[in-house]
Each structure stands twice: as C-alpha cells, then as structure tokens.
Image (tube, grey):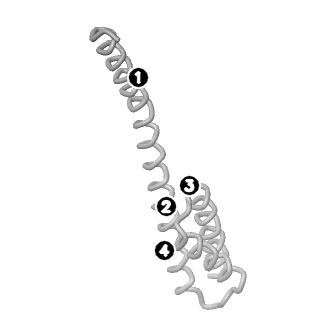
Amino acid sequence: MSPSLLIWLVGGVLLLAAGIVTTLLPRLRTRTRATRVAWSRARAAIDSATVSRDAAAVRLPEADRLLARAELLAAERGGTAAAQVATEHARQADRLWRSQS
C-alpha cells in the first residue's frame, strides 16, 4: 500500500468520524436538555401539589395516591415520558386539593 493511499484513507476515516460526531452531538445535547427541563417541570408540579396538600383541610385519598405516584416516578428518574406522567399526576392531585379549598 502506498503512503499517499494510506494518508487518503486515514483522512477519509477522520472526516467521516468528524461528520458523525458533528451530527450526533447536538442531538444528544438537545435530548439531555429536554429531559432536564421535563424533570424540572415535574419537580415544580410535585412541590406545588405538596403545598396544596399541606394547606388542604380535608384528606383526599385519590389526590394522595396521585402525588405518591408522581413522587415515585421522580425517585426512579426515568426519561422525558416519565417526567411528563409525573407532572400530570402532580397537577391532577393539585387540582383536587385546590377544588376542596
């Protein structure tokens, strides 16, 4: 194998690797950011539901169950879909407690 062919081959492989990294890195960053934002939103909803629970005069078993599910999902730290489900459970619990106030 001639040295010039080897140089072209190595250069081509490096160029291909650089293209793959350039394509995948922004996607990974976007996915990571979306997951962080979703979990931040879920934690805020859980905190809001917890405040509503503490302020409620009446105990609501359904709302307690929804909040417990949301907290369990948050403890397991799943992906974006799990964060969205936890957010929805916490918001439903919050609505139930606020409707009783």
Q: Label 1 amino acid?
A: Leu
User: Tag on residue 3?
Assistant: none
Is the residue marked by circle 3 packed among few (<14), some (14-19), or many (20+) residues within 10 Å? some
Q: 14 above or below 26?
A: above
What x and y, as percent, mark residue 14? Answer: 34, 24
Cα gap from disc 2 to disc 1, whole angstroms: 35 Å
Cα gap from disc 3 to disc 2, whole angstroms: 7 Å
Cα gap from disc 4 to disc 2, whole angstroms: 12 Å
Q: Which residue is mark 1?
A: 16
3 and 1 marks in contact (CB < 8 Å): no
Select label 2 or label 1 by which is in front: 1
Residue under the image location 64 percent in, 75 percent down: 69
Q: Label 3 amino acid?
A: Thr
Q: 3 above or below 16?
A: above
Q: 18 above or below 42?
A: above
Q: Which residue is mark 3?
A: 80
Which corner quadrant holds the N terminus? top left
Q: Earlier in the sequence, mark 4 or mark 3?
A: 4
Q: Label 4 amino acid?
A: Asp
User: Tag on residue 47?
Assistant: 4
Cα gap from disc 3 to disc 1, whole angstroms: 31 Å
Q: Earlier in the sequence, mark 3 or mark 2?
A: 2
Residue under the image location 56 percent in, 55 percent down: 80
Mark 4: which secondary structure? helix
Q: Earlier in the sequence, mark 3 or mark 1?
A: 1
Q: Earlier in the sequence, mark 1 or mark 4?
A: 1
User: Tag on residue 39?
Assistant: 2
Q: Label 2 amino acid?
A: Trp
What x and y, as percent, mark residue 2? Answer: 31, 9
